[in-house]
Image: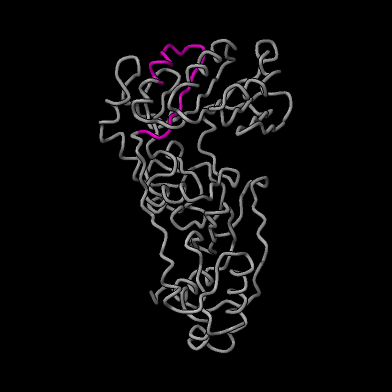
C-alpha cells in the first residue's frame, strides 16, 4: 500500500452512525454495509487524508485496523485513492437539498363498497398539484370494467406511477387470470398487490411487479417497518434528511372521502365531496407533519437505518407526536429484529480491532 496516497470516500457513499453500529449507504448501487461505529468516527476524521498522515496520528497497534478499514472501502468500491490533496479537493460533498416542482408528490386513495366520491375529479385535482404517484387501495372486490375505465383515464394523465392493492375473489376477479396482459396495456402501473389470494407468487412484467399474497390486508397494516421496505437511494435519503420520509408532500383520501395526511390517520381536513385538495394544502396544520424527520423521532434518531426506513406517524408507541413507530420491531440496542422473518443477517466483516476515536473530539 502506497502510504503517500490519499483515501477518499465516494460522495454518494454515506456513513450513518447508530447507537451500536453504523451503516454505509451506497446510494448509487442501492446497497448498504454494516460497519463498527469506530469506522464512522475514523473516516469522519480522516476522509481525504493521506495514509501516512493517518498512521502518523495513530499508534502502531492500530495499523492493522487502519489497513483493514481502507481495504474494505477499496474492495467494495466505496472509496478511491488520490495522488494529491488538490486532486482530493476536486471531489465535493453531495448536495442534500431536496427540491421538487410538485405541490403534492404522492397520494393514497382508499375505496370500498360504501365509497361515494368521483375518482376523475380527484385525479384532475392531483394533476393540478403535479402529483407524480398514486396508490389506490380497494378494500372490497372491484368491478373489472370500473377499474379499466380508471386506468384508461390515467393513461393520458401527467401522473407517472400507479400502484394498486386489490382483493382476490375467484368469482368476480376474472380479469386476474389475464393480469399480465392487463399490466402490459397500462404502462403507468408499477405495482399490483393482490391480497387474500390462494397462493403466493411474484411476477415481474415490464416495469411492474405483480405480487400475490395469501394474507388479508387492511388499512391498519399501514406503517410496518422492515428490511423489505428499506430504500437505499439518493432521492429517499435526501428527502429523509430534510423531511418526513412517509408524509412529506403526501395526501390521503380514506374510503369515506375524508382528506388526511394518510388514510390511516385520524385527523381529517375536510371531505373531498365538499372541499378541494388545494384548499386543504393551504392549511398549515396539514403540512406540519412534513417536517418531522427521523432525527426528531425518539429512538429512530439513534438508528443506523433512519435515512432508508419509511416513517409512520399513524401508529406510534405513544400519543407523543415524536415517538417511535409502534410497528417497528427493530431493537437498536441488540441490533436484531424481534420478528424472525425480518432479521437482518449481519456478517462480522472486520476483525475485533476497533480504533478508539471518541465522538467528543468533534
Q: Which is more toward the observer, 97 or 222?
A: 97
Q: Is residue 193 left or right of residue 263?
A: right
Quarter holding the C terminus is bottom left
| The N terminus, quarter of image | bottom right
The spot of residue 349 in percent (x, y) is 66, 67
From the viewer's side, name the closer residue of 184 and 248.
184
Q: Looking at the picture, how far across and down is residue 71, in whole percent?
A: 62, 73
Coloration of the structure image: one colour
Q: Is residue 8 magenta?
A: no
Image point 56% across, 14% down: which residue?
148
Residue 58 at x, y = what percent? 51, 86
Magenta stretch contains residue 120: yes
Residue 361: image location, x then y, percent = 39, 77
287 relative to 301 in the view: left or right: left
Q: Is residue 155 above or below residue 55?
A: above
Q: Residue at 41%, 65% (x, y): give it.
A: 92
Judge whether 358 appears above or below 206 on screen. Answer: below
Count of picture labels: 0
Which residue range is magenta in the image? Answer: 104-123
Which residue is drawn at the image coordinates 56% and 27% (left, top)? 187
Amino acid at each position: 500500500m502506497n502510504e503517500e496516497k490519499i483515501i477518499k470516500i465516494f460522495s454518494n457513499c454515506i456513513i450513518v452512525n447508530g447507537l451500536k453500529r453504523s451503516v454505509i449507504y451506497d446510494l448509487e448501487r442501492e446497497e448498504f454495509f454494516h460497519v463498527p461505529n469506530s469506522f464512522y468516527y475514523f473516516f469522519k476524521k480522516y476522509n481525504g487524508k493521506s495514509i501516512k498522515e493517518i498512521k502518523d496520528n495513530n499508534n502502531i497497534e492500530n495499523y492493522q485496523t487502519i489497513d483493514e478499514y481502507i481495504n474494505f472501502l477499496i474492495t467494495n468500491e466505496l472509496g478511491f485513492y488520490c495522488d494529491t490533496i488538490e486532486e482530493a479537493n476536486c471531489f465535493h460533498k453531495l448536495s442534500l437539498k431536496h427540491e421538487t416542482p410538485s405541490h403534492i408528490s404522492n397520494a393514497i386513495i382508499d375505496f370500498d363498497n360504501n365509497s361515494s366520491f368521483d375518482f376523475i375529479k380527484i385525479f384532475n385535482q392531483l394533476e393540478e398539484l403535479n402529483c407524480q404517484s398514486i396508490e389506490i387501495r380497494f378494500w372490497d372486490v372491484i368491478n373489472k370494467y370500473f377499474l379499466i375505465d380508471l386506468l384508461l383515464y390515467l393513461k393520458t394523465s401527467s401522473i407517472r406511477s400507479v400502484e394498486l392493492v386489490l382483493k382476490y375473489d375467484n368469482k368476480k376477479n376474472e380479469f386476474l387470470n389475464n393480469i399480465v396482459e392487463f399490466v402490459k396495456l397500462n404502462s403507468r402501473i408499477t405495482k399490483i398487490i393482490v391480497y387474500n389470494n390462494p397462493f403466493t407468487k411474484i411476477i415481474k412484467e415490464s416495469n411492474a411487479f405483480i405480487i400475490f399474497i395469501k394474507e388479508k390486508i387492511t388499512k391498519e397494516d399501514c406503517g410496518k417497518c422492515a428490511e423489505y421496505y428499506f430504500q437505499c437511494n439518493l432521492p429517499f435519503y435526501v428527502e429523509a434528511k430534510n423531511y418526513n420520509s412517509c408524509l412529506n408532500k403526501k395526501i390521503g383520501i380514506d374510503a369515506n372521502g375524508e382528506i388526511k395526511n394518510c388514510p390511516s390517520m385520524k385527523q381529517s381536513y375536510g371531505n373531498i365531496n365538499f372541499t378541494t385538495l388545494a384548499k386543504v394544502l393551504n392549511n398549515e396544520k396539514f403540512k406540519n407533519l412534513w417536517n418531522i424527520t427521523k432525527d426528531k423521532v425518539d429512538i429512530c434518531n439513534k438508528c443506523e437505518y433512519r435515512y432508508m426506513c419509511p416513517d409512520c406517524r399513524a401508529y406510534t408507541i405513544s400519543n407523543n407526536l415524536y415517538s417511535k413507530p409502534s410497528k417497528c420491531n427493530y431493537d437498536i440496542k441488540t441490533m436484531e429484529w424481534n420478528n424472525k422473518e425480518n432479521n437482518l443477517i449481519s456478517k462480522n466483516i472486520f476483525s475485533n480491532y476497533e480504533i478508539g476515536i471518541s465522538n467528543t473530539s468533534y
